[in-house]
Image (cartoon, rainbow, N blue to C red):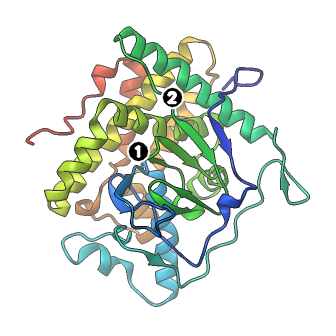
Amino acid sequence: MRWRGRRESSNIEDVRDGDENAGGGGFRIPGGLGRGRRGGSSSGGRGPIRRASGGGFGTIILIVVAFFVLKSCGINPLDMLTGGGGGSLVPQQTERTTRTTPMPQPLPKSGQRNGKVSSNDEIKQFVGVVLAETENVWNGIFQQDGRRYPEPKLVMFSRQIRSACGQASSATGPFYCPGDSKVYLDTDFFQTLERQFDASGDFAKAYVIAHEVGHHVQNVIGVLPKFNQLRRSMSKAESNQMSIRVELQANCFAGVWAHFTDQKGLLERGDLEEALNAATQIGDDAIQKRTQGYVVPESFNHGTSEQRKAWFFRGFETGKVKECDTKVFEGY
């Protein structure tokens, strides 16, 4: 992706070296779309329930980490997947979760010098440019429809962060919080994406950001609020199916962004393949095959590799938001 020298967004909040990273031993884990938890306010978690959109990436990292932690403790994670109506490794986030096993140490950060993060390091510039390009695209799309696009903030953090959706850990990966309209990103995830998920390249990273911004678009147009309302009265199976449709729509929105980015001449040879590979590597089936050797389809809640890849490509090929209708609320 030809990103160097382009405008950087002013909507970046870099708290990788700030007090926001401090946290106690217990924390609430932000998961995939709609997994509610108490707001992380000064009231000690007694605020209104917010629901974070993990966009597939947050839940994915938690599942991978949890799988190996449980295996090392002699617990069979497959029992958790197949029992109790297709339960997930992700705990319900309306409760405070206390971690009893040590977290893996974070990988060295890009741009660090003597333990400090440079304010103008390359990864921050990259994230700023990608976010700016999403702003350009979605501002244009909303203007054509006679609407204003409220640009989201993107918070770069390390280790832990407090959001309107609660306190998050690096282990959960990128997520979008509709409570404060912010995307949260620990940039160590990019190294995880490359080293553990075999998804390398600038455009694979850009795809991650564009997908989370896609959830912001869903929040603005009312998809996320309605989803979070409906899922309260759904069974787990019904909620999983609707969650998949929401995720795939966000993937399609990321493809729409890629379409217009390509029209500007910013994509290079191999960029599209990088994004499609990233979408493939984080499909529910790919994750389960990697961690347990086989798949449990009834536990899917983010879409298969083929589905994620197909909907991203659909958005990329058409460049039309109306083509991203995944029938989220069909039957409701």
Which residue lies at the image location 70% right of the left edge and 60% below the top edge?
Answer: 19
Residue named by callout 1: 178
Q: Is residue 202 left or right of residue 307?
A: right
- Going by the numbered disc 2, the residue's amino acid type is Glu
Residue 200 at x, y percent in the picture: 63, 44
Q: Which label number is shown at residue 151?
A: 2
Q: Quadrant of the C terminus?
A: top left
Which residue lies at the image location 60% right of the left edge and 40% below the top edge?
Answer: 205
- Going by the numbered disc 1, the residue's amino acid type is Pro
In the displayed structure, would residue 221 be above or below residue 266?
Answer: below
Instruction: Give the mark, 1 or 2, whose residue is nearer the N terminus.
Output: 2
Which residue lies at the image location 85% right of the left edge and 55% below the top edge?
Answer: 116
Name which quarter of the figure residue 233 lies in: bottom left
Which residue lies at the image location 69% right of the left edge and 51% below the top edge?
Answer: 15
Secondary structure found at label 1: loop
Q: Is residue 270 visible?
A: no
Cα separation, mark 1 vs mark 2, equals 13 Å
Residue 164 at x, y percent in the picture: 47, 53
Q: Quadrant of the N terminus?
A: top right
The extreme left residue here reads 331
In the displayed structure, would residue 87 be above or below residue 71?
Answer: above
